[in-house]
Amino acid sequence: MEIREKILANLSAVKEKSPLIHHITNYVTVNDCANIVLALGGSPVMADDLEEVAEMVGFASALVLNIGTLNSRTIESMLVAGLRAKELGIPVILDPVGVGATKLRTNTAEKLIRELKPEVVRGNMSEIMVLAGQNVAIKGVDSIADEQGSSFIAKRFASELSCVIAITGKTDVVSDGRQVCLLDNGHRILADVTGTGCMTTSLVGTFCGVTKDYFTASIAGIISMGMAGEIAQATLRHGEGIGTFRARLLDSIYNLTPEILARDGKISYE
Amino acid sequence: MEIREKILANLSAVKEKSPLIHHITNYVTVNDCANIVLALGGSPVMADDLEEVAEMVGFASALVLNIGTLNSRTIESMLVAGLRAKELGIPVILDPVGVGATKLRTNTAEKLIRELKPEVVRGNMSEIMVLAGQNVAIKGVDSIADEQGSSFIAKRFASELSCVIAITGKTDVVSDGRQVCLLDNGHRILADVTGTGCMTTSLVGTFCGVTKDYFTASIAGIISMGMAGEIAQATLRHGEGIGTFRARLLDSIYNLTPEILARDGKISYE
Amino acid sequence: MEIREKILANLSAVKEKSPLIHHITNYVTVNDCANIVLALGGSPVMADDLEEVAEMVGFASALVLNIGTLNSRTIESMLVAGLRAKELGIPVILDPVGVGATKLRTNTAEKLIRELKPEVVRGNMSEIMVLAGQNVAIKGVDSIADEQGSSFIAKRFASELSCVIAITGKTDVVSDGRQVCLLDNGHRILADVTGTGCMTTSLVGTFCGVTKDYFTASIAGIISMGMAGEIAQATLRHGEGIGTFRARLLDSIYNLTPEILARDGKISYE
């Protein structure tokens, strides 16, 4: 099946099955993540207490781990939920927010990768470079501008970890260690809103809830956000900005059809 | 006084007195809950630390407990705040989010009901069925589709607990153990946005802050959300969806007058 | 340099340098704070774990501490991050949300002031009066109506603490202990939305990230919010309210230019 057919089938499946997506995530963008999953057609559940995460993940079709505001309590919950997900064959999607900025983030992300072997890791270029062992200057959670070599890093790191690596930026790069896919949807205003990275990971997680083809699921999640960003930005009138854009972004995901998603994705292979 | 007169008087009282509504709630929808209370005319305060909740609830006119992202720290705070509220005669409104999904949620909700004897419990059909001891298949925090028997369960459970039970769904059911009221406002898009259940509970809590008639307060809170949902949905144009809808939902609560609320509620008795 | 020239230069610097603003803040309005910093041109980072805050603040240009939903874990993090910020010469901006309502809030705010000597404290009249040792009746986090004497209190308290005190209300008052500035931008609808106070503090923090003149930075932050509130309110049509207003508030900050900010600020000196 060609990639566009698969993407069409994936979004149809999300809307039909409404997969439950368990998140252990940060308190900054958690509401946006819940709403973007709902907008796509999935069903979000956020639960982070050690005493319930193993039980909750048992109902889920995918587990999204996001270290945006990690703390000792939630790190432990991520490990327990993740190990239970692996036992049950539920995919784990990791968003290593701000990795490299502090030892806690770097150690935690490395531990989650080592112990859970996530099916997908999605980050910006600087985050993935840190995880891939590259030297890189980090400034908070910002991504570095230089995207050269991202294909090379994505492919090598995906191969090393036997997972899908998704690097989002001006051009997004997704690799499963063999194939490398370049995605060119999106608009720069997405970087002016908090949580667009987290939301992209939640969309990827939602697609991973309906297919074992995590490479296609990652592509579908990333182009969904990119296309929604384009559509939302095009509606802005004079005087409007990121407040209105955020609402329209949810609107655009809500109105995205399988046909439009499959048709308008700017997908190329290296 | 007829129900519509009471509802009119209740919303007038909210706007005049601006009751302080103390919430111990989840971090997913907490911002929406605060804004919906403000939109109605109340004054929200969110505080969950064990060292301050007993003191804070003393200033409040109602206490809303929502177990959406419960953890050991906040469960203890809910109990302490709740016991202090009961001592002071302040009504306790419980939202047992996701009860039945995990033992932690079920045990916590049951403990809160047993120890605090809340004045109102609001949930969807599956949540209330779990609490009422019915066998029911739970999938995360989703509500089950079958609403048959909800009147029967609401009335019996309300009678057993000597409280108001509110079951929200396509048709909402409210009972104080003697009367059963059916409410038919609302729109199905409300289920596509996270937090509409939590916000409904916060509206109920706000009305409970101005009257001892918790049956009417529950009806007023639920029809407020239902009517706001109808109004907000009717404004949506082509290309708009849940992002714009969320903003309009707050707008609609903000512009709801006592007269409109009393007039347009679709209220019937069994 | 005249105040308007300084304000113009400050906003230009924010847009050029995109200062990283580390927040340890409440989970109610944290998303709004992150987005308002982005809208102005800054770069927010929210991190509160004891094991990473000292390291994270080292990358930051300012540290915003907000006690809206404080707990024992985050209070400790605030102290550690604050002490590290002082060592590094990074300004600390304190928002003592709800101080006076509970002993925990009062003790914490006093401790943070005593141990960290923040560069700016921004609160409403009742909060600042509590900290300044005035007797005042508190009702939750609401501000008292009477603003008489706010100039006197701001100046005296700023002088005592050797910092900038900003009291926001109908007329905002900012003092560094010598000068007292009165600000008259804003609209009363701002009080109907949760987080407008927190967001104002985040804007002040963002300006403090590009200048050592914290008096001007505080003025710039407060008039930014006031002007955005005016612009956003003026766009509201029949049926719109705080939901649409919130989105337009972010839009208005996003579209604020240094020239407009410097020109339209209603600034006077006592």
Image (cartoon, coloured by chain):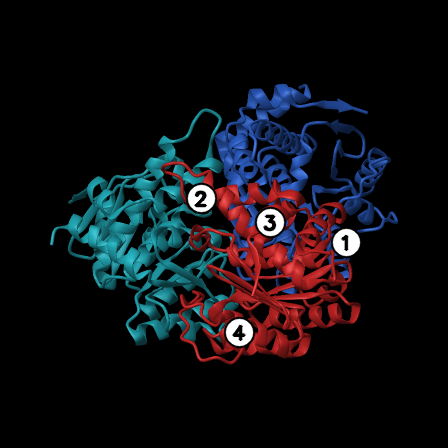
Chain colours: A red, B blue, C cyan
The picture quadrant where one finds residue A180 is: bottom right
Callouts 3 and 1 close, C-beta under 8 Å: no
- Calculate the distance from the C-alpha at mark 2 to the C-alpha at mark 4: 36 Å
- The residue where tag 1 is placed is B110
Q: Is residue A157 visible?
A: yes
Between discs 2 and 4, the one toward the N terminus: 4
- Closest to the camera, between mark 1 and mark 4, is 4
- Closest to the camera, between mark 2 and mark 4, is 4
Q: Position of residue A136 (x, y in %)?
A: 43, 76
Are tags 1 and 4 found on a single chain? no
Callouts 2 and 4 close, C-beta under 8 Å: no
Q: Is residue B51 left or right of residue B171?
A: left
Using the image, determine if residue C85 lies above or below residue A182: below
Using the image, determine if residue C215 lies above or below residue B148: below
- The residue where tag 4 is placed is A152
Helix, strand or loop at label 3? It is helix
